[in-house]
Image (cartoon, rainbow, N blue to C red):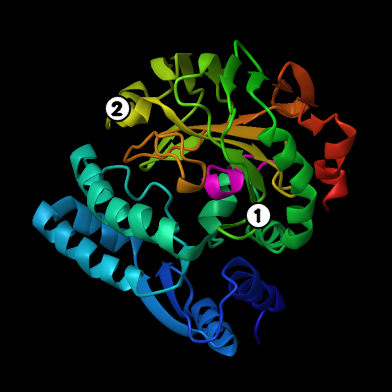
Amino acid sequence: MTDPRMQKLVELLVGHSCAVKPGEHVLVEAIDIPNDFIRLLVAQIAAAGGRPHVLLKSAQVTRALMLVGTEEQWDLSARVERTQMEAVQCYIGLRGSPNVSELSDVPRDSQKLHEKTVWRRVHQEIRVRKTRWVVLRWPNAGMAQLAEMSTEAFEDFYFRVCTLDYARMGRAMQPLQELMGRTDRVRLVGPGDTDVTFSIKGMPVIGCSGKANVPDGEVFTAPVRDSINGVIRYNTPTLYRGVTHNDVRFVFRQGRIVEASSTQPHHLLEVLDSDEGARYVGEFAIGLNPYCTRAMKDILFDEKISGSIHLTPGESYEDADNGNHSVIHWDLVLRQTPDAGGGEMYFDDRLVRKDGKFVLPELECLNPENLV
């Protein structure tokens, strides 16, 4: 018997996230995903009149390929996958690896080679820019363990988060988008020595309500590239290239990260030295999902935590392009809720959010109690 929550989720992905139209080709890239869910998704795409295509992958197999892959091999893989991506109108990426640290022992140069071929040429250049796409993280026992929850409790949490009424959330985001569109100077104050300022003047502001990621719930833009000054200390554990970092701290001067520290300093500097753009920020976003209330070392969830922000070193999105380009895009999360130490967010010296709650009347509809 089909779990009705799974059926509700595939309907969301096909009907809301990708809005599949008759005759459109849809690529499903499934990494370690149960066949039952893929079959439901294929059926739902077909029911909408779409033409499903499935690419099955394994994180363990990808690791094995990365350990031995040459530039010639990855170049061929990128050409093949790029051709497929160019031929579809929609993309649904399903990520289900049970081991979030599967790539932790892959050498840096091997990871960079994969990023500059397959990731950049297929995903950054084609999928993100030319398809309607959504990425979903599939629940498993490993995620439940990272979240410090039982498997059953995590499964219930997962489906609540992922099947939120995103259309309603999208309407509630509009006043925040409009306010950010009128804003020049942003100031973030948080636990420890966090006090950082930057400009978002003239940058596009995008509301995310289940159209590109599930779970979703954020409003993002990009800082003016050279405008960031001050200190930010991220208080949420972060996993990047298979390595977990805690207490990541950056010092910015004229937009550039000039000092950096974490519990993994060597790996941190390797990432920041990937290229020139890795030391500049490509995204500023505000998390809004009322069901995301705890860190779980999965960025698709953590960046949506209600009462959080993320200030992201690396590549900017085409929708809010500040001119910064890089092979990396590392979402790092600062929570400003009372349990995480509190904090304030100011727009043009006006207090907008305190301790994770919006204080302006027109934005109170985005506080958790008004979105559940």
Query: Which quarter of the figure is the N terminus placed in?
Result: bottom right
Residue situated in front as seen by the camera: 15 or 368: 15
Q: Which of the 4 image quadrants contains residue 168?
A: bottom right
Image coordinates of residue 88 in percent, x first then y, are 40, 74
Q: Looking at the picture, which amino acid does disc 1 mark?
A: Ser
Residue 70 visible in the snapshot: no
As helix, strand or loop, the secondary structure at mark 1 comes to loop
Q: CA distance from mark 1 to mark 2?
A: 42 Å
Residue that appears at 73% across and 40% down: 178
Q: Give the residue pinned by disc 2.
A: 276
Residue 245 falls inside the magenta stretch: no
Residue situated in front as seen by the camera: 203 or 366: 203
Residue 37 visible in the snapshot: yes
Q: Which of the 4 image quadrants contains residue 293?
A: top right
Image coordinates of residue 109 in percent, x first then y, are 19, 40
Q: Is residue 67 above or below residue 201?
A: below
Magenta residues span 295-305
Q: Which of the 4 image quadrants contains residue 188?
A: top right
Image coordinates of residue 12 in percent, x first then y, are 65, 71
Residue situated in front as seen by the camera: 297 or 76: 76
Image coordinates of residue 5 in percent, x first then y, are 69, 73
Badge 1 vs badge 2, beta-carbon distance below 8 Å: no
Q: Nearer the viewer, mark 1 or mark 2?
A: 2
As helix, strand or loop, the secondary structure at mark 2 comes to helix
In this rendering, position of residue 41 left or right of residue 184: left
**Dominant SS type (magenta):** loop
Which numbered tag is attached to residue 150?
1
Crowd rating for badge 2 (residues with CA inside 10 Å; few <14, some 14–19, many 20+): some
